[in-house]
Amino acid sequence: MTHDDVLLALNETAVSQELQTIAHKVLQNQRITTQDCLLLYEQGELAFVGALADFVRFQKNENIVFFNKNIHIEPTNICIHNCTFCSYSKKKGDPLCWEMSIDEMLAIITKIPEHAITEVHIVGGVHPDRGIDFYCDLLTAIKNIRPSIQIKAFTAVEIDFMAKKSGFFVSEILQKLKDAGLQTMPGGGAEIFDESLRKIICPTKTSSERWLKIHETAHKTGIPTNATMLYGHIEKFEHRVDHLNRLRNLQDKTNGFQAFIPLKYKKENNYLGIEHEVPWSEDLRNFAISRIFLDNFKNIKAYWPMLGKELSQMTLEFGVNDFDGTINDSTKIYSMAGAEDTHPTLTEEQMVALIHAVGRKAIERDSVYNIIQTH
């Protein structure tokens, strides 16, 4: 959407003077404030924020939508934490728990043709008995069988536990993992940064301050990372703004975040007790406002196994320029929480078709956003 298109949309929409002022800031590539962001959440209608987000998306990425060919490996769902929003974690002895050996994880990779994936994404529960040596051995073994594959692995929460269990500094843990083959980190475990909310939804998990520090250390170590925000539970708009602002501040400092991924709370099979999930319109508003506020993030990603294919496709009109990956039915995190797609898989052809259907150019990327192929 061009500057003139947005102005036309603004003229056709009845908005307050305050919102008009915010819109003109965005059109002039000026940074909006946290108060501006809160006002967008409180008053910005979907069409209004969508038009602004689409403008920002085009300025940063034109009509490109990235995707990659990836699989997820979830080593275990056994976890030391008791997060009330989580539908995934189990304790040892639970009939629904699992813990894969290194050989079992290697078998997942070797059964897939080499040309079919460029990235393996490794995230799981925080297993009480597994530390840095196990995970370094895993990364080394993966690189031995597939030297060309890129490894994105371990949330800050997992890194935090490795450090505490081993007695090493976080910087030492990250360097060991990098030496073993780690190239990028996902953004999980951030949840919502407000400490009062974390006491309710994830009371034993890594603190928000430490999560940010671990990502800052990763950036300094030469490991780019992603960032996430869990929304649609007990948080209020001001909590979302605070979360986004802490991410924007760290990005100003390190420029180490590759993408931001809003993650929707799903209500099934957990103890938080939320009766209704936020509607799809709020999903789209949240993507749009995130795109507007995070002016120093190049990429906003829709995690389609969470939202479903159709709604994820709609996010491409609300600031999103990354459609994640093909997945190959390799993750259970959101299916265990009630996602409609219980076996998430997209072929490369299906991914490209979804992107082309909204008039975008589909580009296959690697884990650090190098272009592999244009469709």
Image: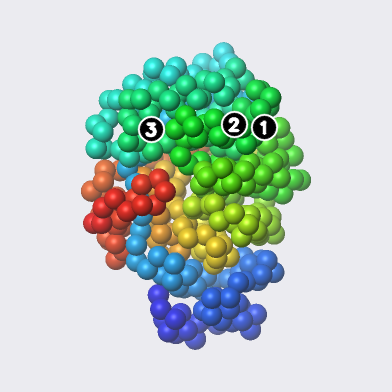
Using the image, tell me which numbered label, if any, was put on residue 122: none
What is the spatial separation of the Cα atoms under label 3 and label 1, in whole angstroms? 32 Å
Please state which amino acid type lies under the numbered disc 2: Ile
* Numbered disc in front, either 3 or 1: 1
In the rendered view, would you say 86 is above or below 219?
A: above
From the image, tell me which residue sits under label 1: 169
* Numbered disc in front, either 2 or 3: 2
User: In the shown orientation, is residue 344 left or right of residue 170?
Assistant: left
Quarter holding residue 205: top right
- Who comes first in sequence, dot 2 or dot 3? 2
- Mark 2 closeness class: few <14, some 14–19, many ≥20 residues within 10 Å: many
Q: Quadrant of the N terminus?
A: bottom left
Nearest to the observer: residue 325 or residue 218: 218
Using the image, tell me which numbered label, if any, was put on residue 173: 2
Camera sees residue 124 = yes
Are discs 2 and 1 less than 8 Å apart at CB?
Answer: yes
- Who comes first in sequence, dot 3 or dot 1? 1
Tell me the SS state at disc 1.
loop
> Residue at 29% of width from left, 25% of height from top?
110
Are discs 2 and 3 less than 8 Å apart at CB?
Answer: no
Q: Position of residue 291 (x, y in %)?
A: 52, 63
From the image, tell me which residue sits under label 3: 330
Nearest to the observer: residue 28 or residue 19: 28
Tell me the SS state at disc 3.
loop
> Residue at 39% of width from left, 17% of height from top?
103
- Mark 3 closeness class: few <14, some 14–19, many ≥20 residues within 10 Å: some
Q: Where is residue 55 in the image (x, y as percent from the top left)?
A: 45, 73
Please state which amino acid type lies under the numbered disc 1: Phe
> Residue at 69% of width from left, 41% of height from top?
210
What is the spatial separation of the Cα atoms under label 2 and label 1, in whole angstroms? 6 Å
